[in-house]
Image: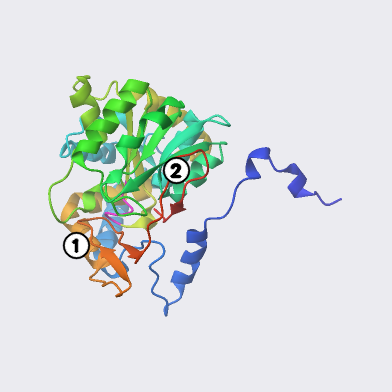
Amino acid sequence: MSTAWTSRYAQRTKGIRSSAIRELLKFTQRPEVISFAGGLPASEVFPTDRFREACCRVLDKQAHLALQYGATEGYEPLREMIARHIARYGIKAKSENVLITSGSQQALDLIGKLLLNPGDRVLVEAPTYLGALQAFSVYGADYVSVPSDDVGLRSDLLETPLRSGPKFMYVLPNFQNPGGTTLSEGRRHELVLLADKYGIPIVEDDPYGQLRYEGEHLTPLVVLDRANLRRDDGYSIGNVIYLSTFSKTLAPGLRLGWIVAPAEVISKLVQLKQGADLHSSTFVQMVAHEVARQLGRRHAVRQTRAAVGTAGARRTGRLRSPSGGRRRRLSAAGDRREHRPGRSRPDAHGSG
């Protein structure tokens, strides 16, 4: 007798829906289509030659490691490189605070698996990144949404939602997806202080922060958490889990991201990742390490400029030109919709 599979599905699958953006990306495989839907990087600036050379070097010199099982935490030289890299932005971490993930999407899934029980609330911006909602919704999350404006999340509207006791805040402070906004310095301080006041952790998702090509970098929330609150000088305690990715700086096909968190949090995330995929591809991690070691940040900035381009606005709209990231928002004339905080599903767009 053939199994009626739908009757066997777990309860948590009932609310799962396919991402409309991921479905749209199927059309980008067609050569005649230029898609603005998914925030794809300009493929013509992928460092193809560097990847080819790196693959050959890894296989010639370290095939015995690259093709073998590896540590769940990730390739140690890559983790050390990430720790050195984020130190440029004031984030003080050791390799033990870094977990390599199969894209930042897996990072979001692991965080949802670690922190969420059915019915737990997550405080998010409105609108926010669709992929995060997909990851958290699998674990039965509800949402408390707070509107954003041209300088990011409205910190003046945070107190009431925070009193409702969300499990954590999910925030994209730099060149936010989908709005393209960057949270102002003042609001960053307010957000960190309010999070501490109400005891609500922050998940800081920063896929675009390295793609700034105008102005100065703003201080990450994880750094302000220590500076404002006089916490330790390392990463043994804190109120912020920090995420980033190689998808925006090297190539999204690598599917490599990372989580930076206190060691006790990393230890629990490692256990969850072991049940998901044992570890991210050792070969891909080693190749990414080779390429990143050579290219640095300048390649990411050049790739961003190529992806963003010099698009103009129609006479009926207004184009906000960001100073980084890969998002430009075109607002129709007369569009004055208000976003009000609430428990309903927030507006959600974009892809990571």
Q: Single out the residue that lies furthest toward the left.
A: 215
Which residue is more in the foreground, 91 or 345?
A: 345
Q: What's the magenta region?
A: 245-250
SS at badge 1: helix
Relative placement, left or right, of 136 versus 336 is right
User: In which quarter of the view is residue 166 placed?
Assistant: top left
Residue 230 at what x, y percent from top left? 19, 19
Q: Which residue is mark 2?
A: 106
Q: Indicate the position of residue 6 as horizontal and vertical percent values.
A: 74, 48
Residue 299 vertical position relative to residue 97 in the rendered view, above or below:
below
Is 15 left, or right, of 299 in this rendering?
Answer: right
Residue at (31, 27) in percent of width and height:
194
Can you tell which mark lies on residue 65? none
Asked which quadrant contains residue 70, the reply is top left
SS at mark 2 in the image? helix
Q: Nearer the viewer, residue 143 or 33?
A: 143
Q: Of all residues shown, which one is farthest toward the bottom? A: 32
Type of amino acid under label 2: Gln
Label ID, residue 302: 1
The answer to whether residue 117 is magenta is no
Compared across the picture, whether 120 is left or right of 66 comes to right
Q: Quadrant of residue 183?
A: top left
The residue positioned 17% from the left and 36% from the top of the image is: 87
